[in-house]
Image: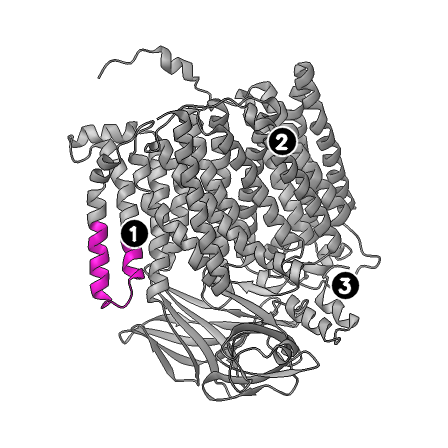
Amino acid sequence: MTRKQRRLVLIGASLSVLAIAAALVLSALRDSIVFFNSPTDVADRNLAPGTRMRIGGLVKPGSVARGENLRVRFAVTDGKTDIAVHYQGIVPDLFREGQGVVAEGKLEPGGVFAADTVLAKHDERYMPREVVDALKKSGRWQEGEAKSAGSATK
Amino acid sequence: MIPELGNYALVLALALGLVQSVAPIIGARTHDASLMQLASSTALMQFVFVGLSFLALVVCYVTSDFSVATVYENSHSTMPLVYKVTSVWGNHEGSMLLWVLILSLFGALVGVFGNNLPSVLKAHVLAVQSWIACAFYLFILFTSNPFLRLAEAPFEGRDLNPILQDIGLAIHPPLLYLGYVGFSIAFSFAIAALIEGRIDAAWARWVRPWTLVAWMFLTVGIAMGSYWAYYELGWGGFWFWDPVENASLMPWLVGTALLHSAVVMEKRNALKVWTILLAILAFSLSLVGTFLVRSGVLTSVHTFANDPARGVFILAILVLFIGGGLALFAWRAPMLKQGGLFAPISREGALVFNNLFFTTACLTVFVGTLYPLALEALTGEKISVGAPFFNLTFAPLFIPLLFAMPFGPLMAWKRGDILGVAQRLITAFGIGIVVVAVTFIMEGGKSVLAPFGLGLAVFVMIGALIDLVERVGIFRVPFSAARQRAAGLPRSVWGTALAHCGIAVTLFGIVSVGSWATERIIALKPTQTISLSGYELSFDGLVQRSGPNYREAAAKFTVRDAGVPIGVMEPSKRSFAARATTTTEAALMTRGLSQLYLSLGDVSEDGSISVRLYYKPMVLLIWLGAIVMALGAALSLSDRRLRIGVPKAAAKSVPQPAE
């Protein structure tokens, strides 16, 4: 084989591996990503039940009810719209009423959100960014909160 | 006084850095040996001054000097001494200082141990290294100064984030940074080669040990980060495909490719341009990682604070070095001479295969990590890309790579015989198939993935050993002769086999945990028991305790294996008053290579608790494999050290007796 032919083999092999990778990435991006919605988005967009998604907002004060077998019911609010969530399992340490939360799961036909994962913030200094944005969008974001959520250094 | 001294030392390091950025290059242009020599001394002095600066910050933390803003923000007088020290880098400013400390350390090492380098190359390498250092000194001094004072010193600090109050913080960031920053040397060598417009096999021989060092630390650093997340976050996962984890995985993937392509360049003088590109990319991805973590683009445990000015500054550094590096590459690389020829089926070909898959796998991780950011910036739509994405993209690319792994070391240089190699691997392949069949039957045919994964791991491991067995000739020649041969084998051969075995060990652990881990989530009252995978845990009750800066509620469990008590597990919830935060401390019990993992959920007033219990079979193999890989690198490195400085020509001039 000449140098040119060898180079062609090399380039051909690289391109085919890249093409396979591109096909994998594109199909995975279509099937396995999860969109984030605020409770208002969920209400406005008429999303089909059964779609996997993340919702985020504040845990509505007074809405948390614990049941048998580690069942938890609560409402997520962005100040404008509430959405009822139920979850079975252990909620994170910083899951509290009035605090930011992100839940991943499916919307059920009745408009109730069945969460299989519940995430809260990592420490008291910030809120999940999705929650901050959802609150900003609904106009319920106050700059006073920004201090506790945003920068940690003065 | 001490913080001001620290600040001053950093400014002095910057001044030295500026001199070192320019003087050696002028020296190389004008053939002025003394100007070129200067770089070695300034590199050493930079390290001394950054070291003093770092020491000053450590003193501030240890003495709890709350007049310093970062100490006030991240420390507390009641913290144990070890956490006072580790909290130095448990925040943005301090961790950047650690970053430049390691950067200047590597510069100094090149200055001190680079005596066998051609003086022009050494001058250029140190100058480039100093450009990077200066950019980061400026970044620290202008946007992230850890020595800033508060107008009024508070009496008490705000404490370190409790999640970070762990011995993991002492180990994980320094190791990870040694890896990240270690690639700066490969980058500097690549840029220096491009500036000079010449590169040869000797270049690869100098770059390889530095890359090996960086790779070794990065491997252990990632593994330790994974283990830390596993026991600290309380849900038993070892890898979350979190963007910050991906940020450390990307340089590792490209760094692994670089290690292998540098072999081709050193041995066969081929793939020069490609190796240079990988050297630039490996460090570029380290910078991208730093940007992702430090700019506040991502929110995670690692993001200590968000400040747009910092993001913009790091982005500027990123554009300057990555853009500049790649532009220089585009301009100068075509001038580099072509190297040796090889057939597609050969050792070189196998290493190209390795490179192709490693870089492509890295590309999929890159897309998965940055696509959500790009989409949000362009459309405002928020998405999360998690494990399902990477399972569908990264895994299919890694499987052919693993399968091809045993073939590489057995292939001959220049022109290989793939059928001959396949024949030599037939034992490994046969044992692999037996493992697949046995696991499949034992599992009752539930899944294909687990038996296949285990079979692949066994094939890779035995394949790596076959290379050693053949070279030593252990089953063919008498034992004493085999022992002699084993002693005569280059250490890098042992290193390769060991590192490849490490991959197999990790794969074995991942498959085992992924397929056979069991879990229970349950609420229970005192004296009740839970059983899982043959173990029985009875809840004896809650104990209230207090630590140096926290109070904790620990649940006491007696663990029984087939009715016989084997120990006590005490998962707890700690509440830290200074931050009004609670953390969950999981309890681990190691049984051989497997672990029982118990983590506490909600604690009710009536004494009932909720717990998560996991049984993770052979989970320790995941991290042991990484340690084996690093040992392989260390072994390989010890070989390099002996070989460097031995002139190649001398070996050639001694006529070899015909065999």
- Residue B146 visible in the current orientation: no
Disc 3 crowd rating (10 Å Cα; few below 14, some 14-19, many 20+) is few
Is A57 placed left or right of B264 in the picture?
Answer: right
Disc 2 crowd rating (10 Å Cα; few below 14, some 14-19, many 20+) is some
| B100 to A112, vertically: above or below | above
Tag 3: amino acid: Phe
- Residue B194 visible in the current orientation: yes
The foreground one among B23 and B162 is: B23
The verdict on residue A81 being magenta is no
Which of the 4 quarters of the picture holds residue B508? bottom left
| Image location of residue B116, percent across then percent down | 52, 20
| Image location of residue B448, percent across then percent down | 28, 62
> Does label 3 or label 1 sit earlier along the sequence?
3
Residue where numbered disc 2 is placed = B328
- The residue at the point 41 percent across, 80 percent down is B539
**Which mark, by number, is residue B155?**
3
